[in-house]
């Protein structure tokens, strides 16, 4: 049982590490970004509400995302823990998560890991990211390329750049992170939950460091 929050700037590598850790530890990765993107793709009411915010790099309103998180975290899939990737992202969301944990009588979070990397690393990771629109597998043109250029190794689909990974939107997302999400570092530090992770270096090095920070054996 482990309840984790991964905190960090857009593109720092949270999703990449969350997927790997989730597979090895057999607990679900809960990515509000992935859930919202799927809703946009399906054209649901949630997707229609979220689309404009996401494409311009702004946060989807707190009440919408808190409702979504509540629905997901109280589902049976999450009864043995979860890795939260991209939630909470504002102090209001963090307070709502604390209330949800209290209401469900759960023990609190085990760790909140802050992924730290310099701005230029983050920009390179975001601008080089390619995603499979069919199965959502994530690649990087230099650091995690597909075997066959521009095609997904998993399903063969044509890779695409996320709408919000264009350079103008990237800057807007990083500014939003600084203004609205970075205060969560102090929020969780005050509660004794914050662990800092050096997120530079290749994907395998970061994963080894992440396991060490969480006190987990091996990589
Ligand atoms: P979301 O999908 O959560 O995006 P994000 O936080 O901006 O994070 P990313 O998915 O862009 O990056 P990541 O850190 O997971 O990096 P990744 O592992 O892919 O949110 C999108 C939008 O949805 C938001 O802007 C907002 O509108 C909305 N939203 C979502 N949650 C919300 C919330 N709670 N409240 C309000 N709105 C919300 O890696 C990036 C690239 O780098 C990849 O190509 C990868 O292969 C590569 N890479 C990873 N690690 C390394 C490494 N160590 N070395 C080299 N390359 C690496």
Image (cartoon, rainbow, N blue to C red):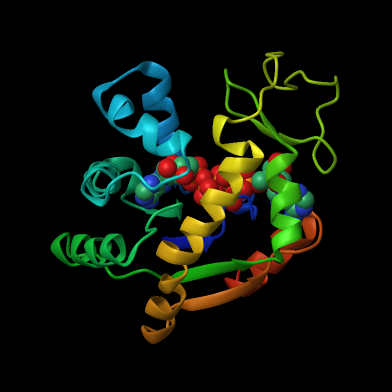
Report which quarter residue 126 is drawn in.
top right
Q: Is residue 130 left or right of residue 177?
A: right
Q: Which residue is drawn at the image coordinates 28% and 31% (left, top)?
A: 49
Is 15 located above or below residue 40 in the figure? below
* Image x and y of residue 22, in percent: 54, 48
Going 69% across and 55% down the picture, which residue do you hit?
A: 122
94 above or below 47? below
Determine whether 198 is above or below 172 in the image. below
Report the quarter where the N terminus lies: bottom left
Q: How many numbered marks appear?
A: 0
The residue depicted at 53 percent of the width and 68 percent of the height is: 113
Question: For the view shown, which residue lies furthest in the left direction?
Answer: 103
Residue located at (62% from left, 38% from top): 165
Quarter in which the C terminus is drawn: bottom right
Residue situated furthest front in the rendering: 168
Can residue 131 be seen from the camera position used here?
yes
Task: Residue 104: name its quadrant.
Answer: bottom left
Q: Nearer the viewer, residue 73 or 197?
A: 197
Q: Is residue 137 left or right of residue 26?
A: right
Relative to 70, 86 lies left or right: right
The quadrant where residue 116 appears: bottom right
Counting from the top left corner in percent of width and height, residue 41 is at 43, 20
Answer whether residue 26 is visible to the viewer in this image: no
Question: Is 14 or 25 nearer to us in this picture?
Answer: 14
Q: Is residue 189 left or right of residue 10?
A: left
Q: What is the x, y in percent for residue 34?
A: 46, 36
Q: Is residue 210 above or below residue 28?
A: below
Question: Percent position (x, y) of residue 200?
Answer: 76, 64
């Amino acid at each position: 049982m482990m309840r984790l929050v991964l905190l960090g700037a857009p593109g720092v590598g949270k999703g990449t590490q969350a997927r790997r850790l989730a597979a090895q530890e057999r607990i679900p990765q809960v990515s509000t970004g992935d859930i919202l993107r799927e809703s946009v793709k399906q054209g649901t009411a949630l997707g229609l509400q979220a689309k404009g915010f996401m494409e311009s790099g702004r946060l989807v309103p707190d009440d919408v995302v808190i409702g979504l998180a509540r629905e997901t975290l109280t589902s049976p899939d999450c009864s043995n823990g979860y890795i939260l990737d991209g939630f909470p992202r504002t102090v209001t969301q963090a307070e709502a998560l604390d209330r949800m944990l209290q209401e469900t009588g759960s023990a609190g979070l085990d760790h909140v890991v802050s992924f730290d990397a310099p701005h230029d690393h983050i920009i390179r990771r975001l601008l080089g990211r390619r995603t499979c629109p069919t199965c959502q597998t994530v690649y990087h043109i230099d650091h995690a390329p597909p075997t066959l250029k521009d095609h997904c190794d998993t399903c063969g689909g044509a890779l695409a750049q996320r709408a919000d990974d264009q350079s103008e939107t990237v800057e807007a997302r990083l500014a939003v992170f600084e203004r609205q999400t970075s205060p969560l570092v102090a929020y969780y530090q005050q509660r004794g939950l914050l662990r800092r992770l050096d997120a530079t270096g290749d994907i395998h090095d970061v994963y080894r460091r992440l396991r060490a920070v969480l006190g987990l054996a091996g990589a």
